[in-house]
Amino acid sequence: MSRLYPEIEPFAQGMLDVGDGHLVYWESCGNPLGKPALVLHGGPGSGAGAFWRRFFDPAVYRVVLFDQRGCGRSTPDAGDVRTDLSANTMPHLLADIEKLRTHLDIDRWLLLGGSWGSALGLGYAQRHPDRVTEIVLFSVVTSTPAEHRWLTRDLGRIFPEQWDRFRDAVPESERDGNLPAAYARRLADPDETVRDRAARAWCAWEDTLVSNVPGSRPDPRYEDAAFRMTFTRLVTHYWAHDGWFADGELMAGAHRLAGIPGVLVHGRLDLGSPADIPWRLAKVWPEARLELIDDAGHGAGRGIGDVVIDALDRFRDTGVPNHGGAA
């Protein structure tokens, strides 16, 4: 990404008690009296890294980042096998967002989300359209059973050797069923060796999904054992349940976004989330503009991040900033 804004540090941060024994890390960056914006990271389980701050003009935006339940700096850590994930679901995350908005005394905010964060952003906006000014999404997903089947089975037709290794990392009796659920069970095994092998196999498949784009490299975060375990426990937990969205829910509910301007940025080479997903979404969300980047894949690289920044720059002077607080 060539156009990132300079690095900045938070002017406020904290741990929000959202119930169920969970504390969610949040931070505010940029202009305390600026246009509110919320970052929704991907994964699930990736955490809100500092690079997200750099999409926004810090003189104009009041940027809020938070680590979703169980990951990043939030506690308890989902990577700990003793951490119960039953209170870590999409409805819980949506409730956390509303608690955070109220805690920070924000009336309405722009949403920026990538990958899983795009599905979470759509889910939040469809439930709370009166709280959303604009939406910018990239690497768009809608967390359907068909999308998860594509990710964990159908792409084996393109990467047969790698998929065989991915499938064979779970017991033979579970290979024809719900593969994310099978992995989730391995990642909850009392034996640390079993958990580690499952986490490594899952991350190897994740790297495969983005390997079709020239110049792609393995994600260095997967070399970190702690990150690897947190990420894989959460992503398998969510994919096993299709993100707790009803099949087709986010497409069917797109009419609730009427009046909210949106930009969808997507790589045409994105195998993790094929381009027909944002294409169909743009058809049922009239205020959304789709930007397809021909040589880009999944994530913010190869021009996608620059288009995201362009969209945020266009939106920075629209809407009414909330001056109720500086937290």
Image: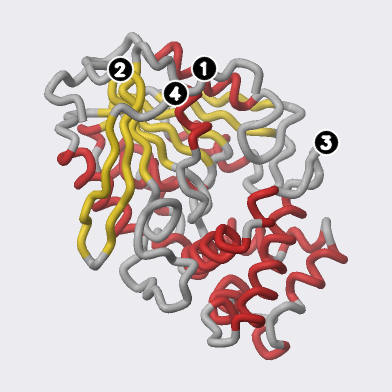
Q: Residue 264, image x and y in percent? A: 52, 29
Q: Quadrant of the C terminus?
A: top left
- Element type at mark 3: loop
Q: CA distance from mark 3 to mark 2?
A: 36 Å
Quarter of the image where one finds residue 97: top left
Mark 3 residue crowding within 10 angstroms, few (<14) / some (14–19) / many (20+)? few
- Report the mark closest to the observer, 2 or 4: 4
Which amino acid type is marked by label 1? Tyr
Furthest-right residue in this view? 161
**Is residue 218 something that shows in the picture?**
yes
Q: Which mark is residue 215?
A: 3
The residue that label 4 is drawn on is 8
Q: Residue 215, image x and y in percent? A: 83, 36
The residue that label 1 is drawn on is 5
**Numbered circles on residues, count:** 4
The residue that label 2 is drawn on is 31
Which amino acid type is marked by label 3? Gly
Q: CA distance from mark 4 to mark 1?
A: 9 Å
**Residue at left offset 67%, top offset 33%:** 267
Q: CA distance from mark 1 to mark 3?
A: 24 Å
Taking 6 as reference, is 48 above or below it? Answer: below
Quarter of the image where one finds residue 171: bottom right
